Amino acid sequence: MELSARNQLKGKVASVELGAVMANIKIEVEDPNTITAVITKESAERLGLAEGDDVVALIKSTEVIVGK
């Protein structure tokens, strides 16, 4: 499946909990080992990011889309 979203994590469904309206799907992720983040140059400079730095990648989103 081709999508324009850059941060795609492939995995396997670990559990499915069906509610009256919503479903809670737990997905175990293995790959990719690299996440690409696109941030402003100003933010990169403010953080002083350099190759080899230890960082935390947070995925900010209002929704997660599941494809099969």
Image (cartoon, rainbow, N blue to C red):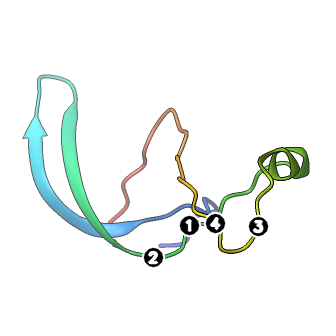
36 lies above or below 25: below
Cβ–Cβ under 8 Å for marks 2 and 3: no
Nearest-to-viewer mark from 3 and 1: 3
Q: Are marks 2 and 1 in contact (CB under 8 Å)?
A: yes
Q: What kind of element bears circle 1?
A: loop
Distance between mark 4 and mark 2 Cα atoms? 10 Å
Q: Which one is closest to the eye, mark 3 or mark 4?
A: 3
Q: Is residue 55 above or below residue 63?
A: below
N-terminal of the two: label 3 or label 1? 1
Q: Which residue is mark 3?
A: 50
Mark 2 residue crowding within 10 angstroms, few (<14) / some (14–19) / many (20+): few
Which amino acid type is marked by label 3? Ala
Name the residue tied to disc 2: 32
Query: Rounded to the nearest whole Å, what is the CA distance between mark 3 and mark 4?
Result: 15 Å
- Report helix, strand or loop for mark 2: loop
Amino acid bearing label 1: Ile
62 sits left or right of 24 in the view: right
Label 4 sits on residue: 36
Q: Residue at x 53, y 53 (%)?
A: 56
Q: Are marks 4 and 1 in contact (CB under 8 Å)?
A: yes
| Disc 3 to disc 1, C-alpha distance | 16 Å
User: As shown in the figure, which amino acid type bears the numbered disc 4?
Assistant: Thr
Tell me: 42 left or right of 23.
Answer: right
Picture quadrant of residue 30: bottom left
How far across and how far down the image is residue 15, in percent?
Answer: 10, 52
Closer to the camera, 45 or 2?
45
